[in-house]
Each structure stands twice: as C-alpha cells, then as structure tokens.
C-alpha cells in the first residue's frame, strides 16, 4: 500500500496529477479540489494516496489531505459507487460539505453530480449514516452522545458528530471537544471549531 507521495509535480490536468519521485512519475487520479490546491508544475507536491486494484487495472488516487481521502474511502465502500463516481462527487463538494450532507441526510445535493442518480444518492446517505451509527455503537460512546445532544438541543451536536466521523475522526476524540463548545453554535460552526481545535492540538 502506497500511503503518500512527495516529489516534483510534473503534470497538472483536470483530475490528474503526476508526481515524480526518485525518477519515477506517479500518475494520481484526483479531484478538482485537490488540483486547485496544488502549486505550479515544477514545484514540490505531496499527496495522500489510495491504491485501487481490480482485475483489469491498477490505479493510484491522490488527495491533498486525509479528510478528502477518508471521504473517498467511505464513498467507494457504498455499493454501486466506484472510484470515478467518488472523484466526481468530491470534485463538486469539499470534504466538510460532503460530511454535512451525510450528517443532515441531504441526498438531493449529490444528484447534481453528473452520473449520480436519485437512487444512488439516497444509497450513499443511508449506507454511510448506517456505517457511522454502527461505528458509534461499537465505540461505546452512544450514551454520552445522547446525553450531550439532549443538553445542546440535539440536532446540531449529533450532526456535527456524524460529520466529523465521516472525515475520519474517532468519536472518543470528538466528544471532549464538542462538549466544551457553545451549545448555541450551528452544526457548521461546531464542525469548524472542532477542526480548529484539532489543528491547534487542543484535543
């Protein structure tokens, strides 16, 4: 498994970045959001990667940050959603927006992505919400979530928790931060403040 690549960016096209490392150019399929964040060709670049292997092909996918990589991995875990569809979705929405859509159950937004129909969009939301619920129950924090959600009015905290889990964070590291935040904050504000706390190392 190739975890990441660092080297010189030699090609930058729509949905494709080639990074040369030790004389080898690695072609990484990627999203519009990642391409937009990469520098000019000739500069150093870094991508988190995912190696996708099937009978007729081996493809490498690259992402600017782990949040987008985690969203990609969750998407391809949904039945009927392949890497190409996952890249298309993540080219249309940021990881934070994607997480919000899953947490709020908004499947309609996904149908705006070319090739994603209503049934596929609904399946994405249902399967990922179910996966998050199972992960939450397995972590042993379900009662704590219920207590904090009730104290904060319920919806915003629950949605923020689910969204942050979509981004790859564990419930055990999310809850202590959410518990300290103002209960009047919106879901989006709760997510931003939690991510800011993580970045600052204040977990």
Image: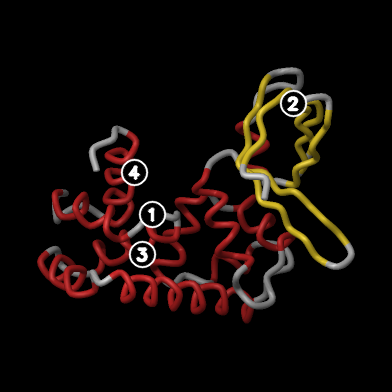
Q: CA distance from mark 4 to mark 1?
A: 10 Å
Q: Is residue 38 left or right of residue 159?
A: right
Q: Is residue 152 above or below residue 31?
A: below
Q: Earlier in the sequence, mark 1 or mark 3?
A: 3
Q: Secondary structure at mark 1?
A: loop
Within 10 Å of the Cα at label 4, are there few (<14), some (14-19), or many (20+) other Cα atoms?
some
* Residue at left offset 39%, top offset 60%: 165
Which callout, 1 or 2, points at the residue further toward the start of the chain? Answer: 2
Above-or-below relation of 128 to 185: below
Q: Position of residue 116 (x, y in %)?
A: 68, 70
Q: Hey, which residue is sitting farthest bottom in the picture?
A: 119
Query: In terms of depth relative to the viewer, which is nearer, 118 or 199?
Result: 199
Q: Which mark is residue 9?
A: 2
Foreground: disc 1 or disc 3:
1
Question: Which quarter of the image is occupied by the C terminus?
Answer: top left
Mark 4: secondary structure: helix
What x and y, as percent, mark residue 114? 72, 63
| Quadrant of res 139 | bottom left
Residue under label 4, please give it.
195
Query: Can you tell which mark lies on residue 33?
Result: none
Q: Which residue is mark 3?
A: 162
Q: CA distance from mark 1 to mark 3?
A: 10 Å
- Name the residue nearer the viewer: 133 or 156: 133
Tell me which numbered mark, 4 or 1, is placed earlier along the sequence: 1
Identify the disc placed on residue 169: 1
Q: Residue furthest top?
A: 42
Mark 2: secondary structure: strand
Residue at 37% over, 75% down: 133
């Amino acid at each position: 498994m190739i975890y990441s690549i660092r080297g010189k960016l030699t090609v930058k096209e729509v949905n494709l970045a080639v990074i040369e490392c030790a004389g080898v150019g690695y072609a990484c399929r990627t999203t519009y959001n990642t391409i937009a964040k990469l520098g000019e060709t000739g500069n150093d670049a870094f991508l988190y990667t995912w190696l996708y292997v099937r009978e007729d092909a081996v493809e490498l996918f690259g992402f600017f940050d782990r949040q987008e990589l985690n969203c990609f991995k969750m998407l391809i875990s949904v039945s009927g959603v392949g890497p190409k569809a996952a890249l298309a979705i993540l080219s249309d929405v940021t990881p934070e927006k994607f997480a919000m859509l899953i947490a709020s159950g908004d499947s309609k937004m996904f149908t705006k992505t070319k090739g994603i129909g209503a049934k596929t969009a609904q399946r994405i939301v249902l399967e990922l919400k179910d996966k998050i619920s199972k992960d939450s129950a397995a972590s042993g924090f379900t009662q704590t979530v219920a207590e904090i959600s009730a104290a904060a009015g319920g919806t915003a905290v629950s949605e923020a928790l689910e969204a942050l889990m979509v981004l790859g964070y564990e419930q055990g590291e999310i809850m202590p931060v959410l518990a300290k935040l103002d209960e009047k904050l919106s879901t989006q504000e709760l997510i931003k403040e939690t991510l800011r706390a993580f970045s600052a190392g204040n977990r």
